[in-house]
Amino acid sequence: MSQAQIIDGQAFAEALRGRIGEEVSGLIRDHGLKPGLAVVLVGEDPGSQIYVNSKGVATEAAGMLSVTHRLPDSTTQEALLALVAELNADPAIHGILVQFPVPAHIDPLVIQAAIHPDKDVDGLNTINAGRLATGQAGLVPCTPLGCMMLLEDALGSLRGRHAVVIGRSNLVGKPIAQLLLRADCTVTIAHSRTQELPAVARLGDILVAAVGRAEMVRGDWIKPGAAVIDVGMNRIPSRRPKAAAAGKTIVVGDVAYDEAAEVAGWITPVPRGVGPMTVACLLQNTVTAARRLNGLAV
Ligand code: NAP
């Protein structure tokens, strides 16, 4: 039986998008400023096509300018860099996102580095990673930003709590650890070489799983009453044998939800947990970038 309070990321993200829409109306009305997001997709990856479409729809729904550049698989790195340079110089564009993965002949690090740091709404270039690590204002990766909003909404102040983050990717694990540190948590970062991982995880008043392994975190890895943030999105065969035989799949997190919900104090489900926050925070970052680029307070 579930005891944990469910952190409804879907509802939170919808409310956040509503607030962003109101903020955008105010920026247009008071400053003639319409935040603009450019998304660049190279190639035909079906998953990326879905993400890019949904980002465009969400951007327009918030009243912002949405521009999507769809480039063929054969696009050279030079051509992509030329487009990024054009977008860097375009005053109507405040956020630039190049959808990853890019084709193998393009170096993602070169592309990330070419995006103007103040338009880097993915928060992935080294200038923004450095700003985050040194406590300066910058743009923060969207998924970690969303996780922090959910945690602070559920718990209030995070000060002094022990946060354990499983995963150390540049996209999720490292930036969320930095944000938790900034919020005065004591932070432990665990990874694939961590010994006694269940015991380490059990130290966490806050446990963030960003691993990419379906249901790896079991109920007995969780400190009773902890807040569990499950970033994982893993596609596995349906649990119903007939559906599985027909090739049907489901998405699960990195946490074994039913077990974990019996022990945790708060928990994000998958889906409807962290996932919807990522697009909402992309919109938030675009508004933040538009304000800063126009000398307005954030
Ligand atoms: P990633 O780059 O593959 O990083 C995974 C991390 O997990 C690595 O640091 C790795 O350790 C660690 N790890 C792997 N196996 C482990 C194990 N057995 N024990 C302990 N640690 C282990 O993945 P990512 O990009 O951070 O994404 C993580 C998950 O979040 C994925 O499921 C992804 O789909 C999901 N995700 C969701 C959203 C969203 O919007 N909800 C956004 C981004 C990502 P090493 O460094 O030692 O290899």
Image (cartoon, rainbow, N blue to C red):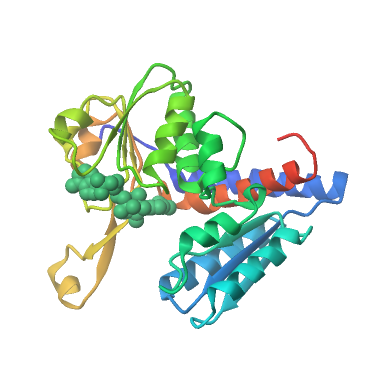
- Whether residue 216 appears in this view of the structure is no
In the image, is 165 to the left or to the right of 110? Answer: left
Q: Quadrant of residue 266?
A: top left
Which quadrant of the rendered structure holds the N terminus?
Answer: top left
Image location (x, y in percent) of residue 7 = 40, 38
Image location (x, y in percent) of residue 11 = 49, 45
In the image, is 151 to the left or to the right of 199? Answer: right
Residue at image x 43%, y 26%? 181
- Whether residue 136 appears in this view of the structure is yes
Question: Does 238 sit above or below residue 161?
Answer: below
Residue at image x 49%, y 65%? 51
Taking depth in this image into account, of 15 and 287 the one nearest to the observer is 287
Residue at image x 86%, y 51%? 32
Residue at image x 43%, y 42%? 8
Q: How many marks?
A: 0
Image location (x, y in percent) of residue 207 = 30, 33
Q: Quadrant of residue 19?
A: top right
Which quadrant of the rendered structure holds the C terminus?
Answer: top right
Residue sitting at the far top: 160
Image location (x, y in percent) of residue 168 = 33, 42
Taking depth in this image into account, of 165 and 105 the one nearest to the observer is 105
Q: Quadrant of residue 244?
A: bottom left
Taking depth in this image into account, of 111 and 276 the one nearest to the observer is 111
